[in-house]
Image: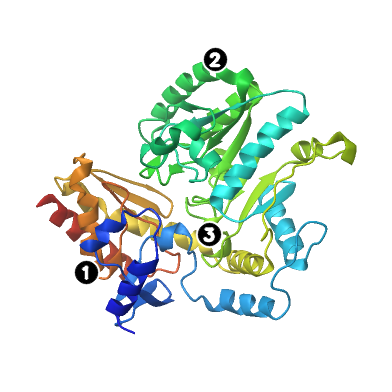
Amino acid sequence: MKNSEIIQKDLQYNWHPCTQMKDHEFLPMIPIKKGEGVYLYDFEGNKYIDAISSWWVNLFGHKNPYINKKIKEQLEILEHVIFAGFTHEGAVRLGERICLLTGFDKVFYADNGSSAVEVAIKMSFHYWKNKGKIKPLFFSLENSYHGETIGALSVGDVGLYKDTYKEILIKNVTIPIPEDKSEEKALQALKKARKIFEKYHKEVSALIIEPLVQCAGYMKMHHPVFVKGLKKLCEEFEIHMIADEIAVGFGRTGTMFACEQAGIKPDFMTLSKGLTGGYLPLSLVLTTNEIYSAFYCDYEEMKAFLHSHSYTANPIAIAAANATLDIFENEPVIENNKEKASYIWKNIQKFKELPNVKEIRQTGMITAIEMIDYPWQERRGLKVYEYGLKHGVLLRPLGNVIYFMPPYVINYDEIDKMIQVAFEGIIKAEKI
């Protein structure tokens, strides 16, 4: 088929996420036929470097031979089974591996990132209720994003997603974030946080944070000291900490999990996206035996955590997750990423010279170039996106922020092209 045929049928029937569909009257849809490595190919042979890992999920490239093999093997054994009263080998193996890797005690399975956040905030509230305390509020950070289901949206702070639904959201209190990545600004923000904890702590079940990088929050970054300080406040005021590592986990920040850099263990950790290497939806909520024990009782006490998904712990998705962990165990992924991150940082210094660039920043394999504060209606980032597509690189911006979060298998020539196309696109955006 031709690109045009696919596009026509798509626009006739499909409604895409995070998209004003009217844009496609002037912005071409890109129909993808296949993927391989860091590349996506359309139906006419054009290829695009997937510089954003298809919404941050792909770790080891499209059509990864090892993950493909493990999924095919699972297909011949078991495609799905109810996870209430039943279990299967893949789930047992993944649960054990994740607990040993993170130091948590228990794994609760869900279907995607937003679902994991829903589970975590419900589980926190329910824990306190089982302990005889009603704590209906949650803390989250200014500029945060945790998903788009109602509970997850409630504890976020990106108005673009949240404002429309404010009348139906649960209660949340926002804590200011550091102004930049420095330790000094982190300490200043912690002083402000303490005052908010002092005022609201008796009513708050949990604080939810994205440690180190607020990804959908325009790639804002903060120092590990901020995460460590917030954990101390949570302990002092008897509030749970939920670490949302859905986007930043599995090596994105330079360590396997971002919390490692702060030296903390939260009460809950949510994982998804890279968990399956970008293959299938699956998420985990990790927690402790102490929290688990508050729900463990005789049936008549009615304290069980009654939350479920039909495809909970799907064996095929779990096969992809176990294959992803195999790659981490068998290859020096984190070490290689550190070298690539250093190379990217060295080669984006030239962006500082552009008059329309406000700041460059990096945490691990996440790099952001923030343009100056153009009026949002001008959509300068979209111009960079269009330029990227015309030159073979997928650069989907966050407002005026252009970022790189590529699959870890990207090579240095591909990095060079990704950077150069972004550089040229930002120059072009200046001249609109």
In the rendered image, which quarter contains the N terminus? bottom left
**Considering only vertical position in the picture, is 306 above or below 339?**
above
* Amino acid marked by disc 2: Lys
Q: Secondary structure at mark 3?
A: helix
Badge 3 is on which residue? 274
Closer to the camera: disc 1 or disc 3? 1
User: Going by the picture, which residue comes out furthest to the bottom?
Assistant: 1
Badge 1 is on which residue? 390
Q: Place residue 201 in its image quadrant.
A: top right
**Considering only vertical position in the picture, is 335 above or below 291?**
below
Q: Place residue 250 in its image quadrant.
A: bottom right
Q: Place residue 389 in its image quadrant.
A: bottom left
**Considering only vertical position in the picture, is 357 above or below 175?**
below
Badge 2 is on which residue? 199
Structural distance between the alpha carbons of marks 1 and 3? 28 Å
Structural distance between the alpha carbons of marks 2 and 1? 53 Å
